[in-house]
Image (cartoon, rainbow, N blue to C red):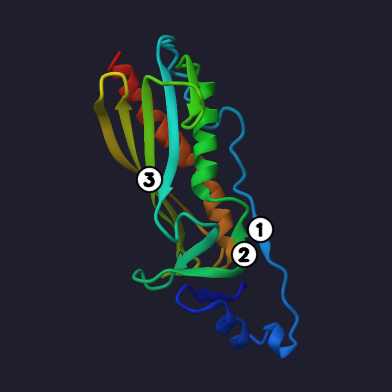
Amino acid sequence: MNRIYYLFFSALSVGVFFGCSPLLGGERAAEVQYLIQPPTAGETANESFSYNPASRSLLVSDVRAAAPLGGTRILFTKDGSSIGAYQLARWSESLGNRLQLELVRSLERTNSFASVTRVGTLVSGDLLLSSELLDATHDAREEPGLVRLQLRVELVDVKNGRMIATSTLTSQAPASEFSSSGAVDGFRKAFPVLVEKVNNWLLSHVHSTR
């Protein structure tokens, strides 16, 4: 099981505590970086939505996230009131960045828009999908625990300057054990489910506002 530390410890105190500080002559363990494996083609696309409003383009904003959710640490909680991070393990990129990329890819596969692009490109859009990551933790109060992803989403009509809909979507899956690798197992199950939920929610509202 990976050693764990709470976020309020400094990096030096953690190193000294575990005897791995260079000041003490200990060997530094290698850090592991985990990938959130993207879903395969078809997993997040909802093929039942084929209306293709070709005059509409969709922009997908960066996924906002407050610290520490916006970083690359793999987070857990043992008491529900404090957050810790697994030592020597992190994501290869932030969950918010990967989530934005997968939403763009999966929404493109639905063929429901003239274009689907990330905010920040030179392409303008008719609709905007905005989101904020509210939770991305391994809840280990009862081992091995559950991983939970929660995302607040907003769909905006850019051309007419109005909010179409808002919602908070949640996906969770069991962790295989109380460790960073066990948490990653759960996140890799919960991640594509959350992408699919966002797709279904967005497409249902786009369809209703045609």
The structure residue drawn at horizontal position 58% and vertical position 64%, both measured from the top left corner, is 180
Closer-to-camera residue (173/23) = 23
Helix or strand or loop: what does disc 2 sit on? strand
Q: Residue furthest left?
A: 162
Measured in 3D between alpha carbons, the distance from the residue under mark 2 to the one under mark 1, in whole angstroms, is 6 Å
Where is mark 2, residue-wise? 89
Q: Residue furthest bottom?
A: 24
| Mark 3 Cα-neighbour bin, 10 Å: few <14, some 14–19, many ≥20 | some
State if disc 1 and disc 2 touch (CB < 8 Å).
Answer: yes
* Residue 204 locus on image (x, y percent): 34, 24
Taking 93 as reference, is 51 above or below it? above
Q: How many marks?
A: 3
The structure residue drawn at horizontal position 55% and vertical position 43%, both measured from the top left corner, is 98
Where is mark 3, residue-wise? 132
* Residue 65 locus on image (x, y percent): 41, 51
In the rendered structure, the answer to whether residue 53 lies left or right of residue 32 reads left
Where is mark 1, residue-wise? 33
The structure residue drawn at horizontal position 52% and vertical position 49%, both measured from the top left corner, is 95
Helix or strand or loop: what does disc 1 sit on? strand
Q: Quadrant of the N terminus?
A: bottom right
| Mark 1 Cα-neighbour bin, 10 Å: few <14, some 14–19, many ≥20 | some
At label 3, the amino acid type is Glu
Closer-to-camera residue (205/30) = 30
The structure residue drawn at horizontal position 38% and vertical position 31%, both measured from the top left corner, is 129
Can the viewer see residue 181 in this picture?
no
Helix or strand or loop: what does disc 3 sit on? strand
The disc at residue 210 is none
Measured in 3D between alpha carbons, the distance from the residue under mark 2 to the one under mark 3, in whole angstroms, is 24 Å
Can the viewer see residue 148 in this picture?
yes
Dot in front, 2 or 3: 3
Labels 3 and 1: the sequence-earlier one: 1
